[in-house]
Amino acid sequence: MIFLINLPLGAAAFLCALRHLPRTQAGDKPRLDIPGMLLVSLAALLVIFPLVQGREYDWRRARHPAR
């Protein structure tokens, strides 16, 4: 059932991209952004690791003290 929505939307987005995005090529190759890649990898690790391993390490939700 999920493909009844996603497949037509993806096909429409692909066709729109072919029609509206320019077909130019850059003169020189873009360089790999190593610091940005490391920063995004670290951010993903810091978000995903607690979500996946939190219960195994018995990490509990932070509770706010009663006022």
Image (tube, helix red, strand yellow):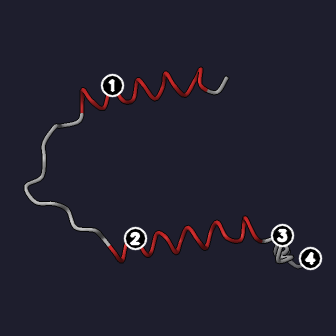
| Residue under numbered circle 2 | 37
- Residue lying furthest left in this view? 27
Q: CA distance from mark 2 to mark 3?
A: 28 Å
Mark 1 residue type: Leu
Of callouts 4 and 2, the N-terminal one? 2
Residue 25 appears at what percent x and percent y?
13, 47
Of callouts 1 and 4, the N-terminal one? 1
Q: Are marks 3 and 1 in contact (CB under 8 Å)?
A: no
Seen at 46% across and 29% down, the residue is 10
Is residue 65 positioned above or below 55 on the image? below
Specify the label residue 55 is tagged with. Answer: 3
Seen at 12% across and 52% down, the residue is 26
Q: Quadrant of the N terminus?
A: top right
Mark 3 residue type: Arg
Seen at 13% across and 42% down, the residue is 24
Q: CA distance from mark 1 to mark 4?
A: 55 Å
